[in-house]
Amino acid sequence: TQAGLVDGKLMYNGKEKIVGISIARKNPRGRHIVLDSISEYLTDKAISSEGIEEATNFVDDYIGGGYARQDEAVNAVIKNTLIRYGIPLDFTYTGKAFYGMSEFIIKNKIIGKKILFIHTGGTPLFFDSLNILWKSQTYMNILVTCAGRRRYLLKYFKEIIGGSGKIVATDMQ
């Protein structure tokens, strides 16, 4: 994802700053993988290796215990993001990246800037982490809109929350 964004920035002379938050690979290996992907795509373009190097901001400070490793701080961000904004994040990819972005913003005192977090997927993995998110929750209500044929989701939520909440499903026909 980062390589594609940097490719687009370089090809179209973008002025934005792209920061890639690694969820698994440490420097220098992770950065080299991104640089190789960028360079491979831009082989036919007149873009210097120095320009590619300068445009690639690879951050590996928020990997935690490694790929798909549980982390209480990440789990707290996942839970808070779901409850406050209704955005599902998983603990393997997007939750760790969102946590890293949030910490990066604080650490670098980024204030008054427009920031775009690109949610690259991982939603199916979110359902794997529901048990973890609801362990400390004593009561949770869930609203599912446009339920339609998604009865399997309703059954799954019912199994996860047990008797500690209500599930309300709506659909328009």
Image (spheres, rainbow, N blue to C red):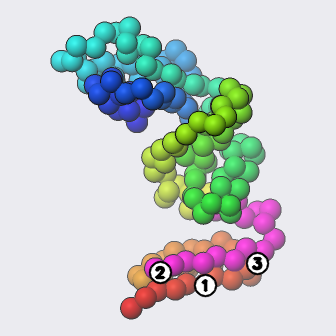
Q: Is residue 141 left or right of residue 32?
A: right
Question: How many other residues sit within 10 Å of disc 1, few (<14), some (14-19) or many (≥20)?
Answer: few
Q: Is residue 41 left or right of residue 33?
A: left
Check the image and report above or below for 19 versus 92: above
Q: Is residue 12 magenta?
A: no
Secondary structure under the numbered disc 2 in the rendered image: loop
Q: Residue drawn 63% across and 82% down?
A: 167
Q: Which residue is mark 2?
A: 147
The residues tagged by marks 1 and 2 sit, at their Cα atoms, a distance apart of 10 Å
Q: Earlier in the sequence, mark 1 or mark 2?
A: 2
Give the image quarter of residue 21: top right
> Where does label 1 land, which residue?
168
Residue 164: numbered disc: 3
Seen in the picture, residue 57 relative to 145 is either above or below; the reply is: above
Q: Going from the N terminus, do you reach mark 3 or mark 2 first? A: 2
Whether residue 167 is situated above or below residue 104 in the rendered picture: below
119 relative to 67, above or below: below
Please name the amino acid that badge 2 sits on: Ala
